Image (tube, helix red, strand yellow):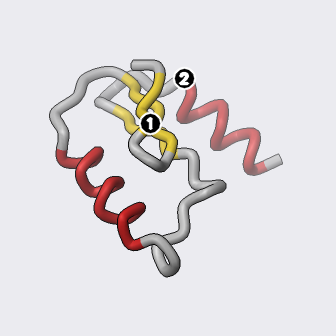
Amino acid sequence: MLNKAYDYFFFNYTETPLLVVKTDDIDFVENPEHFDDLIEQIEKPMSGKKYYIPAGKAVME
């Protein structure tokens, strides 16, 4: 139930830019490039909402 509340809040959030990260396949220990790529995504200027999937595939802005 708490998970659904977080989903609702963040998927309807519009006050500031928002990066939604799919964490299912992120493994910072076995794949340090996942960490580097995530930091790169965070540092990019953005507006609105951006969905990020590891392996360099950013989708749906």
Q: Nearer the viewer, residue 51 or 29?
A: 29
- Say above or below: 50 vs 5: above
Mark positioned earlier in the residue sequence (2 or 1):
2
At x 62%, y 57%, the residue is 25
Q: Amino acid at mark 1?
A: Lys
- Residue 31 coordinates in the image, percent (x, y): 46, 71
- Foreground: 49 or 51? 51
Give residue 14's mark: none
Marks 2 and 1 in Cβ contact (< 8 Å): no
Tag 2 secondary structure = loop
Q: Residue at x 46, y 48 (%)?
A: 55
Q: Quadrant of residue 50?
A: top left
Quote the CA–CA distance across marks 2 and 1: 22 Å
Q: Is 11 on the left-hand or right-hand side of 37?
A: right
Identified at 18% across, 39% down, the residue is: 44
Residue 21 location, x and y as percent?
49, 45
Q: Tell me the amino acid under the disc marked 2.
A: Asn
- Up-down relation of residue 3 to residue 46 (above or below): below
The answer to whether residue 39 is left or right of residue 23 is: left
Residue at numbered disc 2: 12
Badge 1 marks a residue whose secondary structure is strand
Residue drawn at x 54%, y 23% as measured from the top left = 12
The relative height of residue 13 versus residue 1 in the rendered view (above or below) is above
Q: Which mark is residue 57?
A: 1
Percent of width and height locating residue 39? 27, 57
Depth check: give the residue in front, 30 or 43: 30
Q: Quadrant of residue 61?
A: top left
Q: How many other residues sit within 10 Å of disc 1, few (<14), some (14-19) or many (≥20)?
A: few
**Which class describes the residues within 10 Å of circle 2: few (<14), some (14-19), or many (20+)?**
few
